[in-house]
Structure formats: C-alpha cells, structure tokens
Amino acid sequence: MNRLTLMVMALVILGGLALTGCESKGPRDTPEGTILALKETILEGRADRIGDFFYAEDPEMRKLMRRLGVFLGNVQKMGTSVQAKFPDEVAALKAQAEEAAKNGKATSFLSQMTSQMGGPGRRRAARAGTGGGDAMRSSFDSFLKSLMADPYGWAEQAETRLTTAFLTDDSVALLWDDQPILSPLGMTMRRAEDDRWYIVLPTGAPGVGSLMPQTPDQYKIFGSLIATFDNVVIDLRADVENGRVANLEQLSQKAGEKAFLPVAAAVFAYANYTSKMPKGEPAKKPGG
C-alpha cells in the first residue's frame, strides 16, 4: 500500500468518520447520551460543532478537530442548498436508499464502510467475480452524491442503528447495524478525565498512525488540506445556488474536478514531509 493510499485512508478517518461527532446537547456521561447529543445537534443544523466531540491528546489536535468542524458545517450548508435546488433528485435518492435498505443492502456510508472493510474475506469476495473495483467505484460515486444531497441523513437513524458494545469500563466499540465500523481498524469511544465520552480515532492502526500529524509542520499541512476541501465545498455550494450545475451527477463531477489538483498537491507535500522525518524516534509534539 503506497503513501498516497495511506494518506487518503487517514483523511477518510479524520474527515468522513468525523460525521459521528458533535457538541453536547445533553448529558455525555454515557455512550448512549453521547449518541443522542450528536443526533440532536446535527438535526439542529450545527454540524460545525462536530470536532468538539473527538478525543484530542493535545491542543494542536483539538484545534485541528475544530477546524474540521468548520468544514463539516459547510458540508451541511451545501446539503441544504442541494435539497432546495434539486428536491426531486434528492427525494429519488432517499427512495432508492429506503428500497435498498428493505432488501438488506448497505446504503449509508457507515454501512458501506462496515461491509467493504470487514476483513480479508469480504475484500477478496468483492474482487472475485463480483465487479471488484468497478463495484467499489460505483458505491463511492453513489456515496458522493448522497453526501452532497443529504450529508447527515444518517443522523435520524443514529439512535437505533449506531450502537455500542463495552470493551472495558471506560471504552466501547462503535457499531452500525451491530457490525464494527471500519473493521478491522475499529472505531471506539472512551471516557476521558472529565467523565465525558469522546470518539477515538484509530490513530494507532498500522499504516495510519504514522501518517497522523505530530509536528507543527504536519499540523499546518493537514490543516491546509482540510481548508482545501472546505474551499471546494464552498465553491460547489455557490455553483448550486447560482445555477451553474444542472443536476447531482454534474455536481459530483465538478467536485472531483475542483478537488483533484489542490488535494493531490497537499497530499504530496504531507507525504514528502513525513518521508523525510527521522526514523526510529517519536516525532516532537507541538509545544513539547
């Protein structure tokens, strides 16, 4: 697995899975209370507060998570604009998702991540005679359109489909439809020193932890990458509101066109910087 692939994986974990966080709307002294709080906050249109619900080991990581929240808030605003501009297409997407769910197919991003990353056996089966990469690309394209049309629609189902299983007294595994999210990496929550429950990113996973930001320069590059995604979303929202896209298909194509070069440049800069860091010793933490 090359550095670019690993970097994209780290971004998915930091970004896409950030959709499971929020600012407190009620007691956070239990995992269930946390899930309820995230649902209420997102449904109130405050996705910009998402980053505050992740566990952060240091001030720089907390700052990065809050910057991520700003981006996810703009994603929510874009979804609102898309729903207003293309109500029929959005309704059709939701109807397709409901029908697929009745047939037992994975429809949400969390469902797809659970099934597609469920282990070597599932990945081999996906590649062997069942469409392989084409099927995964199709799933991603469908996810991208759904993300832009209804980025937080899953929150309405969170209380019943997003559940937990205790690992220790102070940690739980996050499950979607009773299956681990991002298996075999896994997503967890933990009780912190303030007795609140926080979502924990799988930064210790092989190949992922080494790419997580640790130095001031890494945090700066990672922050610029989030800013790049943010600018793309802001531009796409303007395109929707000003009538520069005719439908969701064209919107998803524009998303790729706008994001590819700047994102690739930021990923390259981050991977290049990381490859030049001294091996065999931990990186110096910001302020350390």
Image (spheres, grey):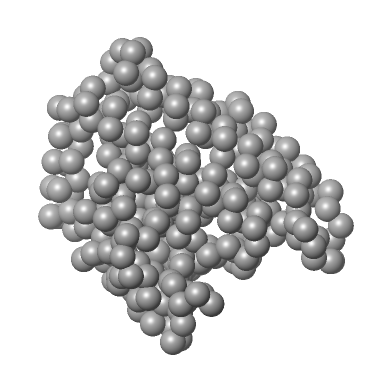
Is residue 4 visible to us here?
Answer: no
Question: Quadrant location of the C terminus?
Answer: bottom right
Q: Is residue 180 above or below residue 117?
A: below
Percent coordinates x, y for residue 32 in the rendering:
30, 72
Report the residue at 48% width, 53% height from top: 51
* Residue at image coords 45%, 86%: 168
Give the camera-side residue of 167 and 285: 285
The location of residue 269, given as percent across then percent down, is 73, 38
Q: Pinpoint residue 182: horizontal percent, then vertical percent.
A: 44, 62
Residue at point 23% right, 22% down? 85
Q: Residue furthest bottom?
A: 169
* Residue 82 in view in this figure: yes
Q: Is residue 146 left or right of residue 193?
A: left
**Residue 5: % across, % down:** 60, 47
Residue 236 location, quadrant: top left
Whether 204 is drawn above or below 51: the answer is: below
Count of numbered circles in the view: 0
**Residue under the point 58% across and 56% down:** 62
Residue in front for this viewpoint, 8 or 158: 158
- Residue 237 placement, left or right of 265: left
Q: Is residue 187 above or below residue 47?
A: below
Is 201 placed left or right of 21 in the picture? right
